[in-house]
Image (spheres, rainbow, N blue to C red):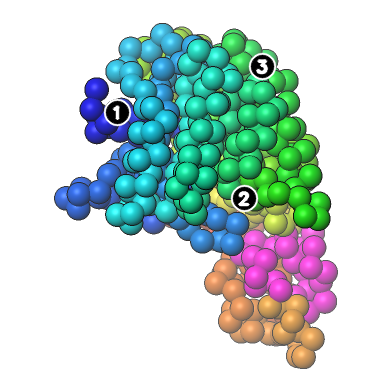
Amino acid sequence: MQVREKLRILADAAKYDASCASSGGPKRDSLGTGGIGSTDKGMGICHAYTPDGRCVSLLKILLTNQCLYDCAYCINRRSSNVPRAKFTVEEVVQLTLDFYKRNYIEGLFLSSGIVKSHDETMEEMTRVARSLRDGHKFGGYIHLKLIAGASPELIAAAGAYADRVSVNVELPREDTLAQLAPEKRSDIIRGSMARVRLGIDEASEKNAPAFAPAGQSTQMIVGADGADDRDILAASAQLYSGYRLRRVYYSAFSPIPDSTARLPLHPAPLMREHRLYQADWMMRFYGFEAREIVTGADGLLDLAIDPKLAWALAHRDAFPVDVNTADRELLLRVPGLGVKSIDQIIMARRYRTLGLDDVARLTRGVEKCRPFLIARDWRPLADDENLRAKLAPEPAQMDLFV
Ligand code: SF4
């Protein structure tokens, strides 16, 4: 099979993995440019963020879509009737170098189905990274997906060559993982994450060689099993604290051809994925605990409004807070105020008592935060019954890449 045909199959097969962070990246379409793929079509190129915050475009491919496993939610599962292909190590290296030199990409995201064994697959993937780094002095970004259960030596090699490594946790609940992916084991997935954490911790010691400097991440499929958003956020919180993950990526389940009746017939709403990303942000940057974010009795995030606003509306007794005196922790809970705005507010209020105009200059979300704040010249209505209706955005078609 020609490399071009392999690329078509294996770039398409890789599009289901969300863990290289296309979310938030600009749309890109190479139709008519001679490039490969687009973020819109999920083919070939995705975007990721480097440790210093730069957005980089990556060649996103599988080494192979052949797989020994039969995970029900995966298009590449053993029983799936899709065309199969496999790159050689040399082909992946050459493609990466060619696209890099043509300025199409700034790095590589490499994942794979499992062929022969965990270790043989992982060994081929690490050979790609080693060849790029040692053989070709490749300085671009490399994200390697780890094969859960691969030997500690191979995980160590992956961490030594890659900027970021990731192991997919797949589903938030262990019982449904056992049902839908019977060959996968949660303890083995977590064991591999623990190995990575150990490598990262050891590398932080003085004079130690670098190990996955962009950290580790994982992906969770949303809506394939009965897990509600409370379950999902609890699982994420545990992953962040237990394995010090840099990111959990959420991927809305999308039905695949010839799948089992145990999977839903309909896709999970993309808005649910979006709300989970916002809730995840609240845990990482605003100091919320996972268990307090979901306010509804059904265990699901409100799709109509963002979860920080939903929390504030469910806790009206915690507001309004005085922008001139409130602690940073309290300000972080105000809808419409982000970390940067709050830092600027805290700096500005050292020199003067802030009015609403001052707040408006320091945040783009003044309309949203106004009902929850007291300022020098502003006090909101105590019991505005229509607050939710006033603050909820007009229903709109969701953009795929928000
Ligand atoms: S191991 Fe990975 S590639 Fe193989 S079927 Fe499961 S999810 Fe798909």
151 relative position to 56: left or right: right
| Lower sequence index among marks 2 and 3 | 3
Amino acid on which disc 2 is placed: Ala
In front of the other: 346 or 321: 346
Residue 76 appears in the rendering: yes
Q: At 38% across and 27% down in the image, what residue appears?
A: 88
216 above or below 372?
above
Q: Badge 2 is on which residue?
A: 214
Nearest to the eye among marks 1 and 3: give it. Answer: 1
Magenta span? 318-343
304 relative position to 9: left or right: right
Locate residue 260, reporting x and y percent.
45, 10
Was residue 136 drawn as part of the magenta stretch in this picture? no
Q: Secondary structure at mark 1?
A: helix
Residue 120's quadrant in the figure? top right
Q: Are marks 2 and 3 in contact (CB under 8 Å)?
A: no
| Lower sequence index among marks 1 and 3 | 1
Q: Are marks 1 and 2 in contact (CB under 8 Å)?
A: no
Q: Badge 1 is on which residue?
A: 6
